[in-house]
Image (cartoon, rainbow, N blue to C red):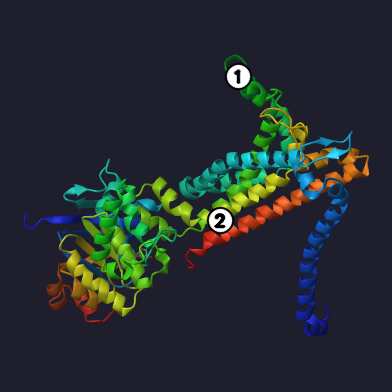
Amino acid sequence: MPEWIYRRLGDRLFATLVAVLGLGVVGAALLITVVLYQGSAEAFRTFGFFGFLTSSVWDAVRGVFGAWPPLLGTLITASLALLLAFFPALAAAIFVVEMAPRWLREPVAYLVDLLAALPSVVYGLWGIFVLVPLVRAHLELPLFTWAAARAPLLVPLLGPPTGIGLLSATLVLALMIVPYASSLARDALALVPQSQREAMFALGATRWEVVRRVVIPYARAGIFSGVVLALARALGETMAVTMLIGNAVNLPYTVFGPAATMASLIANEFTEADTDLHLSALVAVGFVLLLLSLLTNLAATWVLHRLSRKEVRR
Amino acid sequence: MGEPYRMETQNLSVYYGRTPGVRGVSLPIHDRRVTALIGPSGCGKTTFLRSLNRMHDLTPGVRVEGRVLLDGEDVYAPGVDPVVVRRRVGMVFQRPTPFPTMSIFENVVAGLRLVGVRDRHRLAEAAERALRMAALWDEVKDRLHAPAVGLSGGQQQRLSIARALAVEPEVLLMDEPTSALDPISTQAIEDLLEDLKKTVTIVIVTHNMQQAARVSDYTAFFLNGEMVEFGPTERLFTNPEDPRTEAYITGRFG
Ligand SMILES: Nc1ncnc2c1ncn2[C@@H]1O[C@H](COP(=O)(O)OP(=O)(O)O)[C@@H](O)[C@H]1O
Ligand SMILES: [Mg+2]
């Protein structure tokens, strides 16, 4: 760029560029929302917004669509995956920041982060070829035979021990979100001032007590951010879940048996939806998913605000 | 033996990697007296102090040689738990370190919770006693459950002192506890040392000679990682034996 143009326009050009790009992102988000809503209109008109949300029948043949089963599927898989992932993720962060000898820190942190770099479809394949047979042989079959012999009431709750279904999908999902929760927790722990640790050690605390009573509370906002990021990831994860969950939209779900999440339902049925209503219902599910993510984020922002309000600003 | 020492270092050296921070220091610490460590910045006062309650254990690459006796037993002897040493030898740092997620009350009783004290009355009593000793009680008694970070710097430092006192240490190590404080807070802390030493043995690092002269019974002068001179404060300030001590206290260097 010639010098004089730069001198005359430099700052203004830069400001405009930033504004256009920034507003463009916001605009795209709004556009997505609008398009999703328009696409869902027919479904919402036919079943009503709350009727659609709460109806548990999803039957393409009869043209009846209710979002409750995939909504439930998303809530169950995401929250269980989060529960399963949280402590390992936190433990990995604590190990790296507080326990590991210096030379081991970088490699372990790197390996954990690498889990986030694997494509979703690879998790799906690994799930099908490695995890599913293991889960079936060592978890589901033994439990099922035990229940059949000792606690027949549990059998309908457990469902068919095929390996493909809710349990396997949740396990893989949990593994996939560990790096998100862990990496933010790690950053938060690393930011805790050494003086905080020393103050607790000086009172006669063991390393574990220092971590539990000082380091984790100090870092709680960052740890929570990681949890939110992981949850957001789990709510929307599509490919691996679609490959593993069995895609059955019928309630009731069972522990081992097939189920569906909102994302997996859309991915699974979108190409074969042959009526406008079916298509609209799928878009409406997408809209609900968007709403759910939005609500989650709003709630998270609120909690974060409350968490950080009392804290130091130094 | 004459007067019993509460603590004593014998030929103590501390190395950061290969570099010595403190070399060959033998210092007696008299029971229920205030011992001041003075000397120019970087002479090893902090390094020495942190070896007394095994804080160096927490930093990789720091090596301690020699002996640190507490009631005649070496705190670095094999089998001695540093956690137990730190319960008996408390520490107050240069900057106040309130735990930001805890209330004033929880800060004070943090050390008691570590040893499993659950009883509410005992905790409340201990908190009041420690806060009174640290001359903070009157200022905070109506807001014990407010966040500790709402206190002023001087109050936070007295809170750190109360927190260290609540576990009833036998020895209290203070590393320039007033260097970040205003004159009034400094005065408050100097005043409380006088009362504290009735029950607690105190070692205080200060780079302020007037402070050492005001508050201490014994003074050790450090220079370049070595202890140049040790003696009763009055004698050391009025009649130093070593020319370097004299040079320092008359303000000719440092
Ligand atoms: N963590 C450390 N790593 C390496 N050298 C250190 C460390 N801490 C202190 N030192 C060195 O040890 C010497 C004594 O430091 P210090 O004990 O902090 O002095 P003082 O408290 O008297 O100012 C200084 O030369 C300082 O640079
Ligand atoms: Mg120092």
Badge 2 residue CB within 8 Å of ligand 1: no
Seen from the viewer's position, the closer of residues B170 and B141 is B141
Amino acid bearing label 2: Gly
In the image, taking residue A249 as reference, residue B245 lies left or right, namely left
Seen from the viewer's position, the closer of residues A62 and A197 is A62
Amino acid bearing label 1: Ala
**Separation of residues labelled 2 and 1 (CA atoms):** 42 Å
Give above or below for B245 relative to B50. below
Residues tagged 2 and 1 counted as in contact (Cβ below 8 A): no
Q: State which tag comes first along the sequence, 2 or 1.
A: 1
Residue found at x 58% / y 41%: A83
Q: Quadrant of residue A76?
A: top right
Residue A312 is marked as none
Q: Quadrant of residue B153?
A: bottom left
User: Label 2's element?
Assistant: helix
Residue occupying the far top of the picture: A149
Give above or below for B21 relative to B88. below
In the image, taking residue A63 as reference, residue A147 lies left or right, namely left
Question: x%, y% of residue B22?
Answer: 29, 61
Task: Please name the residue that numbered disc 1 is placed on.
Answer: A147
| Quarter of the image where the N terminus of chain B is located | bottom left
Seen from the viewer's position, the closer of residues A54 and B76 is A54
Q: How many marks are shown on the rendered structure?
A: 2
Task: Please name the residue that numbered disc 2 is placed on.
Answer: A222
Residue found at x 26% / y 52%: B122
Question: x%, y% of residue A105?
Answer: 53, 47
Question: x%, y% of residue A120?
Answer: 74, 41
Work out whether residue B42 can be spotted.
Answer: no
Give above or below for A224 relative to A83. below
Foreground disc of the pair 2, 1: 1
User: Label 1's element?
Assistant: helix
